[in-house]
Amino acid sequence: MIFNLGLLGFFKYYNFFAHSWVEAFRSIGYEMNPWTLKVILPVGISFYTFQSISYSMDIYRNKIVPTRNFLAFATFVSFFPQLVAGPIERAANMLPQMIKKREFKYAQAVEGIKLMIWGLFKKIAIADSLAPAVNDIFKNYEHYSGGTLIMGALFFSFQIYADFSGYTDIARGTAKLFGFELMLNFNFPYMSRSIGEFWRKWHISLSTWFRDYLYIPIGGSKVNKWKGIRNVFVIFLVSGFWHGANWTYIAWGGIHAMLFIPSFVMGTNRKDVEDVISETKRFFSLKEMGQIVLTFCLVTMAWIFFRADSIENAVHFIGRMFTHPSFSFAEHWKTNEMMAINMKGILAVLNLGVYYYLFKRNLLNSKWIWFFLLVELLFLGSTRNAVDFIYFQF
């Protein structure tokens, strides 16, 4: 644990703590000259560190036995499709797949290609189309009205989902081509009726990792209410800190903790365990629609802290949303190019809703639907500049 967390802390968080230490002393009038690192962060360090820790912990708890196949272990830790942005895999799932003989399966490969196509569509047609507008609004928020800022926050909500889940789909699809099955990492989180349900559907591999290796070991919910609330704050704050060495991520985690606490105290955090739409349930009720909209709005507000450069900027961004509530289409759709980018993004986002309904109704078996998605990928996904995956920085 010391070795794994030591590497992660040294490379990812040393400068953060050094600068925070300096700022703390500067606030009382004492100047310091810190020694900081000028190194490149190792690729995927957060993901393979957490996988190594889970391997060690599962052995310690006698859940798995140590493998004597070093190649299988090294491949599990550094499996290239999911190395950079997950999902965070468990040895119990991956090591048996590494060791056994694998054979090419046509059906599995077809499923993998479909996942890759859908992931590319979400990344290129949705995330990359929304990125120019999001970057412009968050960079120049002081010059825009509240209506445009709301639009920017909504765009970022869809951008980060399409970007991150798009990568996961590509990673899972690529793994299938090699005969490996990676865990599901997203289950339509924006169709959640509560914050608790959102975290059961968003970045599932990370939330379950913190549950199994942090939340439960410190007591989980099997303690009194005050310690339970403490445990909730611990897991959300650490989750925010895991995303990066910036106070904005910690604030984002703290906001989610505060949003989650009411349902935790009332014991309703495990209430919404079944999907709002399924093969047997065609539509959701007005009450469920209201819950989905409210949850999405709360999550979107928290995303502002995640996306902003500083907590101060996030607070000013939100303040301007409510103090300058006007909206003008001419304000942001300044050029034909920007208008085209925004329209592509909006059309692509609407497509997510259609896809969710078709998927939950088990209507995605038709080859024509996948052909339709591929055509959309080609026509909607054309952008001048490539945009890096957001989670590459974590």
Image (cartoon, rainbow, N blue to C red):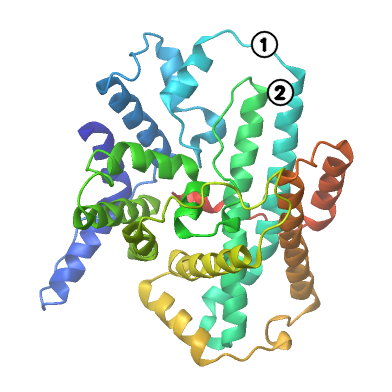
For residue 250, say whether it is visible. Answer: yes
x and y, in percent, of residue 99 in the image: 50, 11
Q: Which residue is mark 1?
A: 103
Q: Which residue is mark 2?
A: 108
- Foreground label between 2 and 1: 2
Residue displayed at 51% across by 42% down: 85
Q: Amino acid at mark 2?
A: Gln
Neighbour class for label 1 at 10 Å: few (<14), some, many (≥20)?
few
Viewer-closest of 339 and 360: 360
Q: Amino acid at mark 1?
A: Glu
- Would residue 90 appear left or right of 156 to someone viewing this image? left
- Would residue 341 appear left or right of 149 to someone viewing this image? right
**Position of 154 relative to 174 (above/below):** below
**Position of 71 relative to 212 (above/below):** above
- Would residue 268 appear left or right of 106 to someone viewing this image? left
- Would residue 39 appear left or right of 31 to someone viewing this image? right
x and y, in percent, of residue 122 in the image: 69, 51
Report helix, strand or loop for mark 1: loop
Viewer-closest of 307 and 37: 307
For residue 135, say whether it is visible. Answer: no
**Position of 232 relative to 71 (above/below):** below
Look at the numbered discs 2 and 1 and tell me whether their residues touch, using CB distance below 8 Å. Answer: no
| Dot placed on the residue nearer the N-terminal end, 2 or 1 | 1
